[in-house]
Image (cartoon, coloured by chain):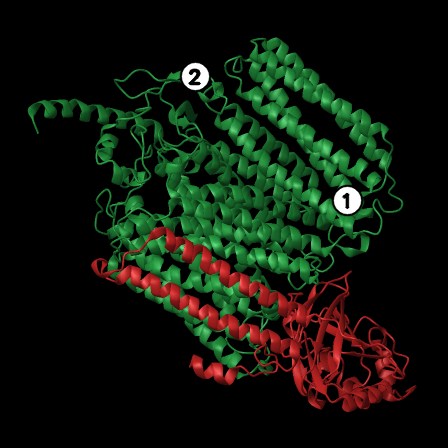
Amino acid sequence: MSSATTNAAAPAKELATALRHDLARVWDNEPGWIGQLTAVNHTTIGLRFVFTGIAFLLIGGMLAMFMRLQLAWSDQTVLDAALYNQFMTLHGTTMMFLFAVPVMEGFALYLIPKMIGARDAPYPRMGAFGYWCYLFGGVFLYSSFLFGAAPDGGWFMYTPLSGAEYSPGLGPDFWLLGVTFAEIAAVTGSIDLIVAILKTRAPGMAIQRMPLFAWYVLITAFMIVFGFPPLILGSVLLEIERAFGFVFYSVALGGSPLLWQHLFWLFGHPEVYIIFLPAAGVVSTLIPVFARRPIVGYTWIVLAIIGTGFLSFGLWVHHMFAIGIPLLALSFFSAASMAVAIPMSVQVFAWIATLWSGKPQLRPPMRFILGFFFIFVLGGLTGVMVALVPFDWQVHDTHFIVAHLHYVVIGGLLFPLMAGVYYWLPHVSGRMPNDGFSRMVFWLIFIGFNLTFLPMHLTGLLGMPRRAYTYSADLGAAVQWLNLASTAASFVLAVGFVAFCIDVFLAWRHGRTATPNPWNAATLEWGMPVPPPSYNFIAIPAVADRDPLWANAGLRRDLEAGVGFLPGAARDVRETLGTTLRAGKPEQVIQLSGSSWIPLLTAITLVFVLAFFIAGWYWPAGIAFVGTVAALWRWIWTTGDGDSPAQLDAGPLGAQPLLLPTQAASADSPGWWGMVIYLLVDASLYGSLVFAYFYLWLAAPAWPPPGHALTTWAWPAFGIVLLLGGSAAIGRAVRRNARALPGGGRSALAVAALLMSGFLATQVLNLVEYGQPPQSHAYASLLYVLIGYQGLHALIALVMAAFVWLRSRRGMVDAVRQRDYRVVALFWHYTTAVWLIGILLVHLFPRLV
Amino acid sequence: MLALTLVAGCTGRQSALDPRGPVAEAIAGLWWVLFWGALGILVLVMGAVFYAMFRHPDRRAPLPHIPFLIGGGLVLPIVVLTVLLIYGTQIGRLITQPAEDPLLIEVTGHQWWWEVRYPARGDMPELVTANELRLPVGTPVEFVIRSVDVVHSFWIPNLGGKVDMIPGRTNTLRVTAGEAGRFRGQCSEFCGAEHSRMGFVAIAESAAEFDAWRRARSATTTVTEGPGLRTFMDRRCGECHTIAGTAANGTGGPVLTKLAARPTLGASTIPNTAETLRLWLADHGRQLKPGGLGPRQRDLEPDAVEAIAAFLEDLQ
């Protein structure tokens, strides 16, 4: 190196050090337990999801070990029926809701911002809030044991068994409230990740150049957006039915037990792909690294992922092949269930092609990928088998299905997860895994797993149903011996998991120190020091390739020197770059929240709401909910930086200034996009309610039923006028504010609020005129839920209008920083639309048919 | 060990791999096709994985990417799945064909027992029993499937697939017994505490034997007194249980007419013997089937047990 370069290098290094110093001051968590409770950084929260998920895996696994002991031979009494049914329910519930989805969400939250070149996820407090809801939801669920009321209706909670008549205790309520609470994390996580992937990628990272893992997570997040709400709705309806006597699922007064099944499986089928796709993303990330060449068929894989996402919503009835639906309808779902194997095959063959054309090396993570191939493909093949209706009619609800589901879940999720843990261990801890130990872990788990679950294919075919706490010796000696073998092998599997945990722990503490990119990987997360700093990047790099670290030899040097956009943290605020959706051009400076108590406190208010509710103290629950609303108000009030200027320089040091709007002044702010994605969730929830309405209508002899006469046209017609007036007023408010007439904007807000309040009054009067209590028939219950749901939206819209009014008064909203107005207008128009649909459903459609 | 189990273990009283009727046979045939096909595909894919992974890169055949992706990822599954779909749909249609004049048997699911009713047919009167079935060999049977409480599922693996028993809905299952035999059926939709102990015995026999059985079962004798009947009625058993020919006409629990002729007690919980009957009566099955429903006061003193047992044993 010439002296000129050395002299230039020294100030550059000093500069980088100064930038790092600033960044650490702004981005590091506070010290001590206060820091842990207030942390919002995606690295911290992501790891927390993973650790908590693994903890629930172990708890769920212990429940399974007891189950296996009970089933080791016929007619055993290790667990009685009551306890077994509780263990069986909690095993499934824990694995599906408290392990599988959160653990991959943790991986995604940790990795995505790093892989796409961002400093943090766009909603740090929401990520933290999601974690607390997940943790508290899981604890709430398990606290049911303390009250002797653990749920025992299966993880799928079929009605009428889970209704008030056949499960009179609090078990199902713990399930419904606890699981829904934990599900908040999935929804908030998906909003966070969608906006992260679409709007905060590094400059130059066009959407067709982003890492495959980001595609997998993006599609998964959209699947959560559309797939979770049916279950959330179904759960809310069941809880209302149990607590207040409404009618949705019980036959006597117009309900249908099959409505639950449809709502549950509308969620349940996409759920399994939600679980699998991020793990497949891990496979797509690791294989090119260990094959030492870029992935074959990037575009094919992206299309396959999108195809899987869409197709998975058309399969749900294959869980209901035995309920007596005509064969023609079943054939459609059978065909769709088989069709989903096609995008899966595309991925498998792309992976094989990558290995084939590369120079593969068998490092510890790769061993688990090979195990994944065998187990997942086997599980996929039995899946094709049960997609055939006549075959499913024999093996449905037997241990054959138990075998199938464990092959696809353990093969498709757990093996890639373990591969991912070994692969990213050096990134998280700065230390390498041990090849010898990890090989032993692999073989223990692989052999233990196969010997446990392979026999179950046969015991199912030999007549052993699932969810059965025991079985008769009449089933034959083969069934007894096979079960004994399964139980014995399950101990090997259990030892394997414990060994995995110990191995990872020891490697974390005592493993060989890792070099920054020990696997010679291509993606951006390996461009930073390991373990990573809290801010990820000294400056946001420009990226022009799918495999940035392979394509650009100088990238690592640039990253270390802080060459890039938004260098350092000069303004003492956490910042990352917002870019355009398709091409990734710099578009806005996004200011992010630092550590805060708000997420934890908001989650705690929800704990009180649910605890009071399950105790039957409904007024205190309502008061606690007011606390939640207050916390949310404070939360949103403190979003971004109210004092920041409308524009900031985001350019690299020493270059021309690149003035970009801050998020309040950008048309594509995270606030806006977050509302858009949230409204998709809301629409899916409302759509499920509309589905329920039509489903129960179709099953009813008359709709409305006799004695539930429709009220006159007057109220709805008047209501529509007020409603549309309100939306018009909001539109005017946005325009007034945009034309620098804040006073005019505020008056229009007030007019809109008045019209909406008037509208709500008409709806209440309409309901009073209707006169029938909700418990009298499913029609009445649906009417109340529709009006309640739509009314809740109207109340939220009113609160939001008051919020914007106050913000405008304080000067935090103006013609340049329009975000608040636009976001509220969006929600307001959505509320109007939802009400209009509701009015059509109730007043128009029955009159037409 | 697995091979030995496979050979010896396919047969069984509740085995889908031991078909005893045309419906189950068709499905079993489908299974073996699926099994060998899946095994073949698994070997093919794993072979490719191992070749790609372990064959030395210099000695590996070069791979044209797009043809490989199209061939393996699209063509192979589309062809295989289309063939399977057509085959599967044909079998589905075959096994659900309604017959000309089937024997109707109504089975209604309760927590945790089976109400069985043979409607009157020709000169045969109606027959109501519980937890047992008989079928004539070679006659198409149409089960009329209902439930009074939660979702159950009706399944006789040796004869065919299952169909769910859903409150508020009537479903149909069509099977024909191809040969005589004694088979087991079991509830296969989780229905609560004693879901595991909700089974039944299905006996297939020649048409003549079946007719004889039906006639014998329908021929009830009227019993109006006796110490056993008196104890039975005093203890209010008749409020839940019906015994044809007596004053007992309750409908909450299983019909006990001709109880002594049934193969099992408690819906296949235990075989029906003198000893087990008394064991059951002593506490109305609280030990044998703890979650099972029954009277609030379950325990019976030994004299009452003996009296009722003797009475029930006479019901042949």
Q: Between disc 2 and disc 1, whose residue precedes?
A: 2
Quarter of the image containing the C terminus of chain A? top right
- The quarter of the picture where residue A490 lies is bottom left
Between A701 and A246, which is closer to the camera in this rendering? A701
Q: Which residue is mark 2?
A: A644
The chain letter of the red chain reads B
Q: Which residue is mark 1?
A: A781
Q: Colour of chain A?
A: green
Residue sitting at 80 percent across and 81 percent down? B256
Residue sitting at 61 percent across and 12 percent down? A736
Between A20 and A1, which is closer to the camera in this rendering? A1
Residue type indicated by callout 2:
Ser
Quarter of the image containing the N terminus of chain A? top left
Relative placement, left or right, of B89 versus A711 is left
Q: Eyeballing the image, is A262 above or below B154?
A: above
Between A613 and B7, which is closer to the camera in this rendering? B7
- Badge 2 density bin: few <14, some 14–19, many ≥20, Cα 10 Å: some
SS of the residue at dot 2?
loop
